[in-house]
Amino acid sequence: MIDFAQVKAAPSPDLLTPENAVVLFVDHQPQMFFGTGSGDRTSIVNSTIGLAKTARAFDVPVVLSTVAAESFSGPILPQLADVFPEQEVIDRSTMNAWEDPAFVAAVKATGRGKIILAGLWTEVCLVLPALSALGQGYEVYVVADASGGVSPAAHEHALQRMVAAGAVPVTWVQVLLELQRDWARQETYGAVMDIVKEHGGAYGLGVVYAQAVIGAHAAG
């Protein structure tokens, strides 16, 4: 039943905001990309950097983590490191980032209850911390196109497992636009348009066209 007396123009508390979210990047490393076969790796890199720039534009706290960086997997994706040049990268031995005390402490320190999670591989280094965080009361939003598994089936089945446990699948553009949510929000409008034009593919070209033909004020 709808209580029409309570209906008003207001956002759902379920929505992601710059104030309630933290973004976790897990194991975007060369060796992990070598084994990724669920989708085009260049597209995954593009989506990952689009998500990173989104977090930076909205001042959303970020945790960067790698696994066995010096002994096996290599350094974090250089383009990702470039977005956060001052950010510490937490290296782990655990496949499940949520079993690493430093990683969990970094997430806790943000005080945020909604986790936006991306990483490689979906079926291991994503699903394990996702289930662990869900089990401790966090809300988890898995950025499917900024993540990848060793095969399409591995990626999809891992997403299904996380969804069944309560995680919400999203895309990086969805996160970007959910955080912006109002084209009149001028403090982030310019940054959002720049991110879309650089990483949004055909959507970005549409923005270039609209701004060229309609004017710089063209929105959406």
Image (tube, rainbow, N blue to C red):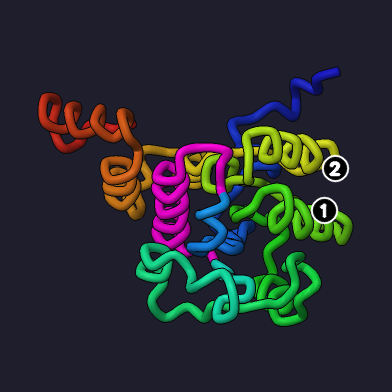
Reply above or below: 129 against 11. below
- Amino acid at pointer 1: Leu
In percent of the image, x 30 and y 28: which residue is there?
202
Q: Residue at x 54, y 39 (%)?
A: 171
In the shown orientation, is residue 192 left or right of residue 138?
A: left
Q: Which residues are magenta?
A: 36-61
Q: Is residue 59 magenta?
A: yes
Residue 12 % position (x, y): 67, 38
Instruction: Give the label on residue 199, or none.
Output: none
Give how far across and how far down residue 10 sits, in percent. Answer: 61, 36
* SS at mark 2 in the image: helix
Q: Secondary structure at mark 1?
A: helix
Which of these two is toward me, 220 or 140?
A: 140
Estimate the spatial distance between the alpha carbons at disc 1 and disc 2, rounded to whole Å. Answer: 7 Å
Q: Is residue 152 left or right of residue 207?
A: right
Between 216 and 53, which is closer to the camera in this rendering? 53
Residue carrying label 1: 131
**Residue pointed to by mark 2:** 165
- Whether pointer 1 and pointer 2 mark residues with C-beta atoms closer than 8 Å, the reply is yes
Residue at horizontal 28 percent and vertical 45 percent from the top:
198
Residue 77 relative to residue 207: left or right: right
Residue at left 33%, top 30%?
A: 203
Give x and y (percent) for residue 152.
63, 34
